[in-house]
Image (cartoon, rainbow, N blue to C red):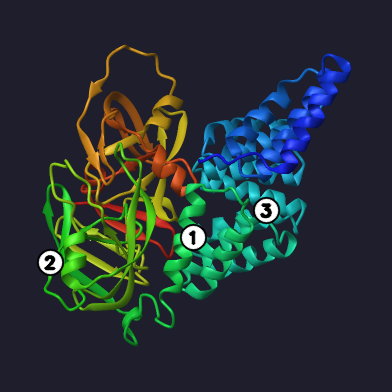
Amino acid sequence: MRRGVLSFAMSVMVVGASVAIYGGDVISQSQSGEVQLQLGHEFFREGRFADSLDAYRKALKSAGPVNIRAARSGVIQSALRIADFPVARIEAATLLEESPEDPSVLATYADALWASGLFEEAEGRYRDALAKAPELARGLHGMARALAARTKLDEALTMAEAALRHAPRDLEMHHTLGSVFERMRRYEEAAASYTNYVNLLPNKDRSEKADWSRAEIKFLKSFGQRVPFEMDPGAADQIYTIDFRLRNDKIVVRAKVNEGSFQDFVVDTGAESTIVSRGTAQRLGIAPVTYTLSAGVGNAGLRGLQLARIDSLEIGTLKLRNIPALIKDPPMRDLPVKEAESLSPLALGFSMIIDYRTKKIVFGKHLEPEESDFELSMRMHRLATVRGMVDGKHTANFVVDTGGEVISISTATATALARPETGRKIALKVFGSSGWDRDAFLMPGVNLAFKEIRYDNFPVVVLNLNAPSALLGFELGGIVGHRFLSKYRVGIDVEHSVLRLKKLG
């Protein structure tokens, strides 16, 4: 996060503190704590969240009386803004111990759980908070996110609008309302909500989330009167079946863009949108609208890519029009394979079934639930994730990623396991959408559980997922890819928020 200069108000505050020191030789512990608390508030208002976190922490450590609850809440909110999710969760748990019945504290704790990727636990705490205070803005906002993650978009919209009625100047709530409108394909209203969010930002805010929002506003407005993801009448009620083939443990289908010829697309549920290479975009007349930030596995971390609109996309008998897309421009260099085109039925608004035995994909807006051996609760918060348990003690969320090859955990999850350092790591050469992950390594002897599905004494790949976690706004615990999914007939049911797995006969 880029840092700006001090505001005039901040300068006045510092001068006031200097006078206190000059007049009394040394500031009292009580004054020190209160000064740090006020510094924290001012830094936070200016969007200098790393500085506000430092000030709030100093306020907490002061020996004299200070508003402990305000300081601890400041630590939590600042930590969430800079994606220091473990700190936010630890301090929120302490805050809850101090005030277990306070509804605003319950909502704050739920925010920290949400940022840790524990969506189900967070939803429970939001409900607890609203049971005590039905008009609590933070509780309503949290429930809006929770309902949207379960694809209950009408209910999520009602909650988000109610939250804003009670806290109209809370910029985060405008952002959440924008995301709900965007999921509902109401782009004009989404752009208006994101504009409200940007207008409420501190003047010096140049965070990644702010940059993303400015680009998204421009992109959404570029649709004008076009209907995003437009289909012919009746097409949304149909079920579609396409063949696929496996190539390097990835699902590959044939699709056609902008009336060109059919070409290969990787089916990648770990991506938020349809992705095309620079060459394909130039060849088929896909013009960029603006730049945005993307993040994935690799040492590049955050990566600038171009947002664009595809005029038409054909997959089997389905034809869609006005499809949001990313152009991989500039392309990554020094990768062992060329960056491929990819699409995700989930990002296109469909549930899907993947049968690795017959090599067929079935997708549609509404799929009848099938018999399964395992059902995992799933949340669709930008990406589809399921809960897993690591070493029997650490709950984490895992992205359901058909574009990935292995089962992996994040460096944050590996650190949380607090395993004794053996002095030896099995280094791996791993590359992803953001280049080579030069810190990747193999961790043997891990116990993984996804409800009844168990992997005991299992070697997992450890990946640096800090950049995508920061951009998504919640901590990614890991990824389940081909090695996990290919043993089953896989049903990714967005409508009912469940991942169904049927063992292949």
Q: How many numbered discs sit on the rendered protein?
A: 3
- In the depicted structure, whether residue 371 falls above or below residue 415: below
Circle 1 packing at 10 Å, graded few (<14), some (14-19), many (20+), is some
Quadrant in the rendering for residue 90: top right
First in residue order: circle 3 vs circle 2: 3
Instruction: Find the distance from the CA under tag 3 to the CA under tag 1.
Output: 27 Å
State left or right for residue 166 relative to residue 81.
right
Cα–Cα span, label 2 and label 1: 33 Å
Is disc 3 placed on a helix, strand or loop? helix
The three-letter amino acid code for the residue at tag 1 is: Arg
Identity of the residue drawn at 28% across and 31% down: 460
Q: Nearer the viewer, mark 3 or mark 1?
A: 1
Q: Quadrant of residue 194?
A: bottom right
Q: Are marks 2 and 1 in contact (CB under 8 Å)?
A: no
Say above or below: 428 vs 298: above
Q: Name the amino acid, label 3.
A: Gly
Residue placed under numbered mark 3 in the picture: 139
The type of residue carrying mark 2 is: Gln
Q: Which secondary structure, mark 1? A: helix
Image position, residue 293 (x, y; %): 39, 52
N-terminal label among 2 and 1: 1
Residue 189 horizontal/vertical position (percent): 54, 73
Kindly identify which residue carries mark 2.
Answer: 263
Q: Earlier in the sequence, mark 3 or mark 1?
A: 3
Q: Which residue is mark 1?
A: 214
Query: Closest to the observer: 153 or 499?
Result: 153
Residue 315 picture location, percent across and down: 21, 72
Q: Residues within 10 Å of mark 2 (few under 14, many from 20)?
A: few
